[in-house]
Amino acid sequence: MSAAKAEALIRHYFDMCNKADRQGLIDCFTPDGVHYFPPGLPGAPWRGAEAIADGWIWCVQNMGSKWTIERVLASADGREAVIEWTHWKTGIGEALRGDEWYVFNDDVTRIAEIRAYYASPVNKAEPVNRLHDFDYEGSGYHMAPPMVEGRD
């Protein structure tokens, strides 16, 4: 039950990202939540629920960002989970694949921490950053960004 609760919270968080719902994003995190990133992202890590929400809304507004979840694994107690995702930057014609490690609060109702890891170093010359020679399509991964109601 707790693993399912963790997965549901992650999926809800991604829905809020895709909808650019600031309050919905804030509500996904503990007030002092932290989102860590690999080196190179200005302003990282994002500290606090509001900063995380504002960061993703900026991505939607400036890069046309949309996200898909490819895989989810959650611990039996629901306190931690790991996912694979794709960040579709439709406004600039790029996509980035990666993983995230999640840590939740005690009752698995809010995200306390996310640690992001990219599948490969970001290469601006590539339209889709991915693992070399991995068969994403054959493995059932999304090959296009999601359709999001109310967005191009």
Image (cartoon, grey):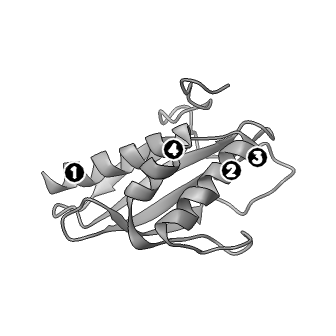
* 61 or 91, nearer to the observer: 61
Q: Which residue is mark 3?
A: 62
Res. 130 visible in picture: no
Q: Are marks 2 and 3 in contact (CB under 8 Å)?
A: yes
Mark 4 surroundings within 10 Å by alpha-carbon count, few (fewer than 14), some (14 through 19), many (20 or more): some
Name which residue lies at 53% across and 37% down. 19
The alpha-carbon separation of the residues under discs 2 and 3 comes to 5 Å
Q: Which residue is mark 4?
A: 21
Mark 2 surroundings within 10 Å by alpha-carbon count, few (fewer than 14), some (14 through 19), many (20 or more): some
Q: Which residue is mark 2?
A: 59
Amino acid on which disc 4 is placed: Asp
Amino acid on which disc 3 is placed: Asn
Name which residue lies at 80% across and 57% down. 123
In the picture as drawn, the residue positioned furthest to the left comes out as: 1
Residue 145 located left or right of residue 27: right
Disc number lying in front (2 or 4): 4
User: Residue 40 sits in which quadrant?
Assistant: bottom right
Q: Which circle's residue, 1 or 2, is located before the other in the chain?
A: 1
Name which residue lies at 60% across and 58% down. 54
Q: Is residue 139 above or below residue 84?
A: above
Tag 2 secondary structure = helix
The alpha-carbon separation of the residues under discs 3 and 4 comes to 15 Å
Q: Are marks 1 and 2 in contact (CB under 8 Å)?
A: no
* 53 or 1, nearer to the observer: 53
Question: Where's residue 34, x and y in %?
Answer: 48, 73
In the picture as drawn, the residue positioned furthest to the front comes out as: 23
Question: Where's residue 122, x and y in %?
Answer: 75, 59
Question: Where's residue 82, x and y in %?
Answer: 38, 60
